[in-house]
Amino acid sequence: MFKKTLALLVGSFRIIFKTSRILVFLLFLGFFVASHTITALAAITSTAISAIAGTTSTVMGRSKTKTLDLTTQNNRLRADLDVEKRRASSLVAENARIRRVDAVTFRGRSTTIKEATQEVLERTMTRTTRSTLANVSSIPGESIPFYGIAIVVAATAYELKAACDNMTDLYDLQVALDPDTARSDDRSAVCALQVPTKQEVWLGIKQSPQIAWDTSITTLGNVTDSVKDIDRPEFDGM
């Protein structure tokens, strides 16, 4: 019983589906004939088709205009980018040219005048500070009779080493800046000085304290006025 009912329903649906297809076909066919025979309906159909075509054309026109604007903007940006690239290349080349002009060879390596000068100044200032502090702090020990000679010799040796290093730095800087005007005589004169030993200093004092005094005062007097007011001691009793 159920199978018969199901078969009947399926058959009914098939008949309805086929009938619907025929009706839709007849409806479109009638509309097509009417649109070509009835003036009003033909006009409405033509207007609808024109409206759809016009809308499509407008959309395509706007899209084309926008594409053209984007292309123009893209070309302008490319041109600006090319200008910036050329400007950057020019700046790089100019910077390289300036560095070549400012470049010097300092102690076997390539550097700039500013860097070489700064290095020498820093080293010289550091040595001068240390040497000055050592010289001042050694005064009390140097003032001790006989035993202070060792401190005098040690302090003088340190000062001489610092002076030699400073002269070497300055000479190397001169060579880097202008090799033709660099002078090695001053550097050699300072670096060649020898500090006498404690025994040599004491022997010179014992042999003639007056000569030792006068020699020191004369030498200092050639470079400073700080010794001109020092009274000359009496060495007759020594």
Image: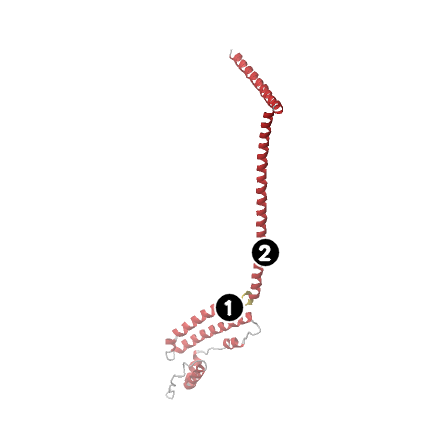
**Secondary structure under badge 1?**
helix
SS label for mark 2: helix
When asked about the image quadrant of residue 71, the answer is top right
- Nearer to the camera, 120 or 73: 73
Q: Residue 69, labelled with which disc?
A: none
The answer, for residue 75, to whether it is visible in the render is yes
Dot 1 and dot 2 residues touching (CB under 8 Å): no
Q: Position of residue 38 (x, y in %)?
A: 61, 23
**Could you give the CA–CA distance between mark 1 and mark 2, rounded to whole angstroms?**
34 Å
- What amino acid does circle 2 point to? Arg
The amino acid pointed to by label 1 is Thr
Check disc 1: other Cα within 10 Å, few if <14, some if 14-19, many if 20+.
Answer: some
Q: Which residue is mark 1?
A: 117
Residue at image location 58% in from the left, 30% down from the top: 47
Q: Which one is closest to the eye, mark 1 or mark 2? A: 2
x and y percent of residue 214 in the render?
Answer: 43, 85
- The part of the image, by quadrant, that contains residue 86 is bottom right
| Residue 86 disc label | 2
* Residue in front for this viewpoint, 183 or 9: 9
Count residues near mark 2 (Cα–Cα under 10 Å), then give few for <14, some for 14-19, many for 20+: few
Position of 115 with respect to 143 (left or right) is right
Please determine whether, in this image, residue 110 is positioned above or below residue 7.
below
Query: Where is residue 168 drawn, in percent x and y?
Result: 51, 72
